Image (spheres, rainbow, N blue to C red):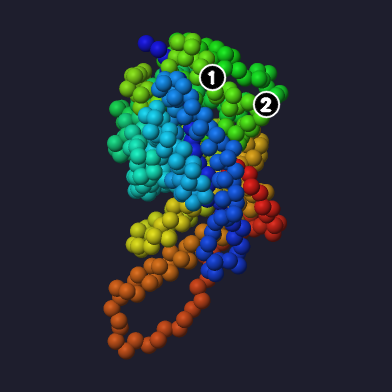
Amino acid sequence: MKKSICLYFQVHQPSRLRLYRFFDIGKDSHYYDDFANRTILRRVAQRCYLPMNALLLEMIGRYKGQFKVAFSISGTVIEQFDRYAPEVIESFRKLADTGCVEFLSETYYHSLASLASPDEFKHQVMKHKEAVENYFGVTPKAFRNTELIYSDSIGEMVYGMGFKTMLTEGAKHVLGWKSPNYLYSGAMAPKLKLLLKNSSLSDDIAFRFSDKSWPDWPLTGEKYLSWIKASAQNDEIINLFMDYETFGEHQKAQSGIFDFMRYFPEVVLNDGEFEFVTPSQAARKHEPVGVLDVPDPISWADEERDVTAWLGNELQNDAFSKLYSLSEKLSIVNDEALWSDFGHLQESDHFYYMCTKFFSDGAVHKYFNPYDTPYEAFINYMNVLSDFILRVDDAISVSDAKFAAPEPEAKPKRKTVKAAPKASKAEKEAKPAAAKKRTTKTKKE
């Protein structure tokens, strides 16, 4: 039996927030930087999505179905495709029609709901599944959580929603002496099959490909295959998971990244030791070799491979807890606009921008951050959240008024001015940084 290579790409663009000042609270409830969202989406579409989709379609045809890949496409970016670049949706539909591309399920808003609210998590997964069916004509069978976040309890929830296959990170502190180049089963869901990312080989393409100071630059198809064969000498499968924006956006076309991807499948297929598979095909082909115990959440981010990129400091935790504390209030109002904003405010990117890691992973965080400092990101987000809280409270007041019985001969109550939500300790500490005007950037998030 041939060994397997599983190629998976994450496709996501966040809903970037506009510069939202304290004095906008209660006056202007449009939170998004439409210009930046459109400009960046169109730029990445021209550099990455359209040319790379065309290349994949060409290779699938050339190798008569032997070349296969998988995608997860967030609901947030699907909305932006629909609004700013519908031709990208059409290019993904053409890939879906080949039968050689698998579309995975995930959280609709690329959120951290799995860490906060099982009900919201399940709602977003079902919402995303419906969107994939509507836009691409396929039903997702396998699952990947936001940023490959996984734990035993999350795996149990995912299995409970009907998924038998899930992708996550091959974190060294979890694996120990074990290899990521096998399938494993979930500790609390024994029938859930887990595919683990081979971080070293994935990052050779995603992060090191165009680095001329890298001792192994330039990377060729033959060289890369030799590394794959060495890594899987006694193993079964190599999982190469990365951001789709690697191609043409993070690694520019001038680096040769498209030529590499055009040539790599030919090298693999001519060698004959490996075949390309989708995650669901991998789960059918291979059996788990053991149970993976993950009591605490892991992800594919940073050296720690945990969730501290999003929930690692007081700023992030304060914003996160305030946002999800609104879930109960929102459940009693039927307002589509509020629910939509609630979803977009959950996007993990907003919390990533507040990360205060300045050492091992600081450069990566800075590259993906449109704010000058994490404190500015926090203040901007909390200003937006303050306005959102006022809107939720107003909606509840209106709802209560509709069902409240009128009191006879009631004296008119004195009107009071509603104060903005009280600032938390984290907000007070971060406010001095807000005085500095944020410059507008259009980096890929």
The x and y percentages for residue 215 are 68, 18
Quarter where residue 154 is shown: top left
Query: CA–CA distance between discs 1 and 2?
Result: 19 Å
Q: Which residue is mark 1?
A: 264
Q: Position of residue 116 (x, y in %)?
A: 42, 47
Determine the residue positioned at 40% across, 34% down: 96
Q: Nearer the viewer, mark 1 or mark 2?
A: 1
Q: Amino acid at mark 2?
A: Asp
| Depth order, front residue of 83/438 | 83
Q: Disc 1 vs disc 2: Cβ atoms closer than 8 Å?
A: no
Residue at screen point 49% across, 38% down:
11
Give me the residue at 60% from left, 43% from top.
43
Report the side of 67 relative to 42 (left or right): left
- In the picture of the structure, the residue carrying the numbered disc 2 is 211
Could you tell me how many numbered marks the image carries?
Answer: 2
- The image position of residue 262, as x and y in percent, is 54, 23
**Mark 2 crowd level (few <14, some 14–19, many ≥20, 10 Å Cα):** some
Quick one: quadrant of the N terminus?
Answer: top left
The image quadrant of residue 224 is top right
Query: Residue 35 or 242: which is nearer the viewer?
Result: 35
Question: On screen, 27 above or below 322?
Answer: below
Q: Is residue 399 visible?
A: yes
- Amino acid type at circle 1 is Phe
Q: Secondary structure at mark 1?
A: helix
Task: Give the residue at x 29% y 87%.
Answer: 408
Task: Locate residue 24, reporting x and y percent.
Answer: 58, 66
In the displayed structure, does residue 420 sit left or right of residue 272? right
The correct choice, above or below, for 286 with respect to 408 in the image is above
In which quadrant will I find the C terminus?
top right
